Amino acid sequence: MLVVKRDGKTVDYDSSKIRIAIEKANEDVDKKQQASSKQIDSIIKYIEDQKKKRMLVEDIQDEIEIKLMENKRYHLAKEYIVYRYNRALVRKANTTDESILRLIRNENKELAEENSNKNTMLASTQRDYIAGEVSRDLTNRILLPEKISNAHKEGMIHFHDADYFIQPIFNCCLINISDMLDNGTVMNGKMIESPKSFQVACTVTTQIIAAVASNQYGGQSVDMKHLGKYLRKSYDKFKKKITDKYKDKLDKKTIECLTMDRLKDELSAGIQTIQYQINTLMTTNGQSPFVTLFLHLEKDDPYIKENAMIIEEILKQRYEGIKNEKGVYITPAFPKLVYVLDEHNCLKGGEYDYLTELACKCSSKRMYPDYISAKKMKEIYENNVFSPMGCRSFLSPWKDEKGNYKWEGRFNQGVVSINLPQIGILSQNDEKKFFQILDERLEICKEALMCRHHSLLGTVSDVSPIHWQYGAIARLKKGEKIDKLLKGGYSTLSLGYIGVYEATKLVKGVSHTDPVGEKFAVKLMKHLRSACDTWKKETGLGFALYGTPAESLCYRFAKIDKEKYGDIKDVTDKGYYTNSYHVDVREKIDAFSKLKFESQFQPISSGGCISYVEIPNITKNLDAIKELVKFIYENIQYAEFNTKSDYCHECGFDGEIIINDQNEWECPNCGNKDHSKMNVTRRTCGYLGENFWNTGKTKEIKARVTHL
């Protein structure tokens, strides 16, 4: 038998530890109340006779208490409980030492694989993680109500970003880049005036991105349409200089050609500045900024031509990639790109179809950009189109005192996610019981989210001037509290959810793609949304239902439930839960049907959603990408592409990644063995376990896979 310890580690069962614990308690009671050696043997035998493959250490201790009571050793049972309590106090006194030491020794693999833009070998990153471990410890022991800490520990919910909870900082945002560029900003106490050229505007933008990332813990987005006017400024400046110098020697056409040549050089250099700065900057927490560039051409934008040029250059440079230390072009993790499909660029003869052609080509090689349908988004968000915050979290509509919609300069206060499959397990196929437990768990989620809100109340603008005083979010006075920006729906509080598919299987016995299961899944999603809407009315806060909060959470919840409830077919036996409302990866469903099916859930999950499809050998399937892009525009708000083909991000190789003589994954082209820089398709049995693939060999090769 294996024993699951409190820290999640699994060790071999050792009966002597039970004997030692009872004998320790024996020492503190009268001889009449002591358990005899025979009785201790009987307790041990009772536990072993259950023949469980694994037990939680807490469950073993519960069994010991019960058996002591049955043997009428009441005083001894009490002493044993005291013994357990004192041991718990010792554990609770400091839970950070070992995790920090493992981090410094580079043995903490959970942290190493948590973020693609964090390298735990670096001193700066380790410093942030050390602070994070202290924050997580204080959060769980002191700051959060015990009910919420226990719910998180038991996998009922997930309290996101506990490693930053002790600080008055928030999750993610849409930077008000227009205000900061047009009206100037301040960084490190130095005035930065409005740029006079595109190149300077790009440099200032990256400085803003770095400063913002250093003072929050989530992603940020920048709408690139605001740079169009600065490209126009550069054009006007170049044209004036050339005209003033050559007006008597050159005709207007030649002057225009020279101007455009200068402008294209500046455009290329400016976008290269953004791309290279984002990938080479290190924020104060030792990582690249988690930033998304929003690529949206608005029909009535006076700078639409300039913005089309900017988008084209961004896509061209992303397609090319960035050189790594070996001089090989690779796919950078950041900035992420989100491209908006509208009537003028949806591959139906529009003026800007050429940009979408380029976006599709870029997707075939780099798997970016993601795609938003302006048509579908307008249906959901009151005729508005706007960027997600960093990656997938969306704001709810909010109007200012003049009745104008506002998106940029808003943010998310924090996220709490609910484990739906665990509720399905406990409901035992009873739908009524499922919703009863769900409502109980939702109340815990609400309380946890209110902890997020209350932790930010009373924060003064001085904690992050770049956010609160100099335009990224607001322009508050020094010493002014941010409270008004936390209320009235200006900022959001997100309820995440994992495992609609598994919950449906557990309650209805079928997938949510089955008509019976689909009806249940829609009911479940609407119930979650209704809870958020109710909380919003009760509190005046911006609660929102948020899909896809964390891929790693799919594994954490499944791991906890497997340890508690064992293998359950199509649920815990897979080693993962499906993210939000997604169709399970093992279901046979074509890409178009998958997008169409999942599209019904996106309007319900308006606080965040994305759907994805896998395209085999994506680099050779450009036509398939184009057809899917057309389909996305007509059918679903937000989608991305993944691939099932092997791919090495170190050198761009898209053949089959081999297993070398040392039983390691290795790129046959460049020799890369870093699993975080490759995609590996499923082999042999197709097992999708916790960050490793079963290769069918004698050993299980650990390999972090970035795209599934």
Image: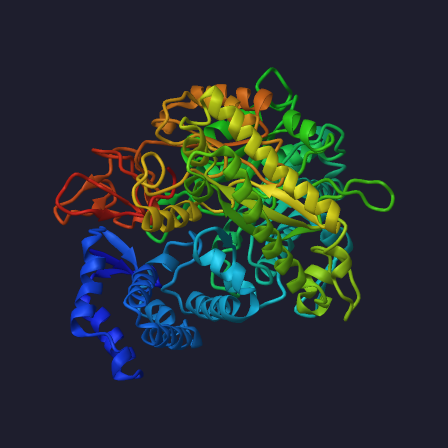
Q: Nearer the viewer, residue 624 or 636?
A: 636
Q: Is residue 669 visible?
A: yes
The quarter of the rendered structure image containing the C terminus is top left
Q: Nearer the viewer, residue 658 or 146?
A: 146
Place of residue 529 in the rendered image (x, y in percent of width and height, measured from the top left): 62, 38
Place of residue 197 in the rendered image (x, y in percent of width and height, measured from the top left): 69, 49
Place of residue 12 in the rendered image (x, y in percent of width and height, measured from the top left): 20, 61
Q: Relative to 30, does residue 488 appear above or below in the rendering?
A: above
Question: From the viewer's perspective, is 73 left or right of 411?
Answer: left
Q: Relative to 670, does residue 474 appear above or below in the rendering?
A: below
Q: Nearer the viewer, residue 600 or 666?
A: 600
User: To which quarter of the image does residue 337 belong?
Assistant: top right
User: To which quarter of the image does residue 297 belong?
Assistant: top right
Q: Relative to 640, does residue 692 appear above or below in the rendering?
A: below
Please state the total of marks drawn on the protein image: 0
Place of residue 623 in the rendered image (x, y in percent of width and height, measured from the top left): 44, 19
The quarter of the rendered structure image containing the N terminus is bottom left
- Farthest-out residue, right: 402
Q: Residue shown at 45%/47% (left/top)?
A: 333
Q: Residue shown at 44%/70% (left/top)?
A: 130
